[in-house]
Image (spheres, rainbow, N blue to C red):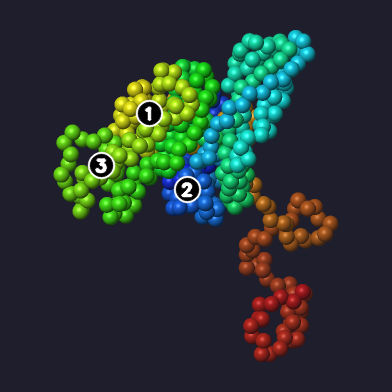
């Protein structure tokens, strides 16, 4: 990166939409300078956009607020990186091979051609392939993570195809590009971008699980041997707990408040007998504990679907998402999984300069934004060029164009009419109808 550039990112989630702008410096640091968020109300469900118009309107308002920031103006967003996540997102393992002439050198072109075949693989007709991520290569019978420069008569690659329902991508493009009018620099697969940002290479090589517990979905990404091994999105999240509490005859806003202040994923040894505005805290505890245990059980069950054991994940579990803000939710996951669990944090190379932005709510959009730091990635902002007004009131046609007569305030003496002007004015008054009082200021050429 030869110079500083600005990167804009848009994250569309089930509970909120975020627009953020970061500044990437020449030394590789990313400073998040402006973050604007707005809650979504039924326009996004399980990460899938349901109301295109309302979602686009929210994005438009957020962009306007970002561009008004004193550290952003007069810059304008000309393109943005947009996160792709949602209920139908998943991995599909696929292996492809190609026979080559004897002792052929494996080049980037050969691997890209093989990856192109993977992207066009036939899978479930209800899904489309978004990306193809190589796990490992085999050149002849030799396994390698870096095949370029090796020699062999065949190459075989194991891929994790990232697939989703076509509607997930189409609605993103329709909202951001067509409705909000923001060109998409790149669609970024959010959970993979976050993993690249906050997981260490050692954790990926050892084997680890990244869990993003959101409002309506929980995303699980498992890494082994330094590469993606499994990806799934579960249709459950923190809002399920809130909805359960509404069964106690309270509105959702009040239920969210009760969950935040009094909810606990692990039951207390001495259950509370308090009554909070007609709501028994013991009833709240029963609901919160039951749903929390269900969510955690489904997270751990993904190990079975991934066909690995907890012993194959010595890197433990890394958690992100607002759902883990529930009291003792992280502890419950640690107890049930028997794995080390840590809260995901941004690396030192990412700095949040916007003091109003909560760190735990910025990790996902930071991951999306980080994709824009790649070499050759475009600058997402521009300073509009003021359009010059056309020159007016030239004295003569043969005068140079660069010297138009300026309309400046003149003194009273310079405004004094000449003899010819007085004659012209007299003729004008002579021909003016006597009852036309409204046109006294009209000039006659």
User: Does dot 3 land on a helix, a strand or a loop?
Assistant: helix
Q: Position of residue 56 (x, y in %)?
A: 54, 52
Q: What residue is pinned by disc 1?
A: 343
Q: Viewer-nearest of labels 2 and 1? A: 2
In the rendering, which numbered label is found on residue 286? Answer: 3
Front-most of residues 294 and 203: 294
Q: Are marks 1 and 3 in contact (CB under 8 Å)?
A: no
Taking the spot 15% from the left edge, 44% from the top edge, the residue there is 273
Using the image, determine if residue 74 lies above or below residue 230.
below
Name the image quarter holding the N terminus: top right
* Residue at image point 52% right, 17% down: 225
C-alpha gap between disc 1 and disc 3 = 26 Å
Q: CA distance from mark 2 to mark 3?
A: 26 Å
Q: Position of residue 347 (x, y in %)?
A: 45, 26
Res. 394 image quadrant: bottom right
First in sequence: mark 2 vs mark 1: 2
């Amino acid at each position: 990166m030869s110079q500083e550039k600005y990167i804009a990112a848009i994250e569309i989630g089930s509970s909120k939409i975020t627009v953020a702008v970061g500044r990437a410096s020449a030394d590789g640091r990313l400073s998040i300078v402006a973050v604007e968020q707005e809650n979504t109300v039924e326009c996004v469900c399980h990460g899938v956009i349901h109301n295109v118009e309302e979602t686009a309107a929210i994005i438009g308002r957020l962009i306007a607020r970002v561009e008004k920031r004193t550290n952003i103006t007069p810059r304008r967003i000309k393109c943005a990186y947009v996160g792709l996540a949602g209920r139908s997102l998943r991995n599909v393992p696929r292996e492809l091979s190609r026979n080559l002439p004897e002792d052929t050198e494996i080049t980037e072109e050969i691997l890209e051609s093989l990856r192109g075949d993977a992207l066009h693989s036939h899978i479930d007709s209800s899904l489309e392939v978004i990306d193809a991520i190589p796990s490992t290569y085999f050149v002849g019978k030799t396994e390698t993570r870096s095949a370029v420069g090796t020699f062999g008569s065949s190459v075989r690659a194991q891929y994790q195809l990232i697939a989703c329902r076509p509607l997930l991508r189409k609605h993103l493009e329709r909202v951001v590009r067509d409705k909000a009018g923001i060109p998409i620099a790149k669609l970024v697969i959010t959970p993979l971008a976050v993993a690249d940002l906050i997981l260490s290479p050692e954790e990926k090589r050892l084997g680890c699980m990244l869990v993003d517990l959101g409002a309506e979905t929980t995303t699980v990404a498992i890494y082994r041997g330094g590469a993606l091994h499994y990806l799934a999105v579960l249709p459950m999240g923190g809002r399920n707990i809130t909805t359960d509490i509404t069964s106690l005859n309270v509105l959702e806003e009040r239920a969210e408040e009760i969950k935040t202040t009094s909810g606990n994923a692990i039951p207390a040894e001495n259950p509370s007998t308090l009554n909070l505005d007609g709501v028994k805290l013991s009833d709240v505890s029963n609901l919160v504990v039951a749903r929390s245990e269900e969510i955690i059980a489904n997270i751990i069950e993904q190990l079975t679907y991934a066909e690995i054991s907890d012993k194959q994940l010595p890197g433990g579990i890394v958690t992100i998402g607002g759902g883990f803000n529930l009291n003792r939710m992280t502890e419950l996951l640690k107890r049930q999984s028997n794995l080390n669990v840590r809260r995901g944090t941004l690396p030192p190379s990412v700095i949040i300069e916007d003091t109003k932005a909560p760190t735990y709510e910025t990790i996902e959009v930071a991951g999306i934004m980080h994709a824009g730091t790649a070499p050759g990635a475009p600058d997402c902002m521009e300073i509009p060029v003021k359009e010059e007004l056309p020159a007016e009131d030239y004295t003569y046609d043969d005068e140079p164009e660069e010297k138009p007569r300026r309309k400046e305030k003149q003194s009273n003496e310079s405004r004094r009419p000449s003899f010819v002007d007085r004659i012209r004015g007299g003729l004008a008054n002579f021909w003016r109808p006597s009852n036309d009082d409204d046109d006294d200021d009209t000039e006659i050429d």
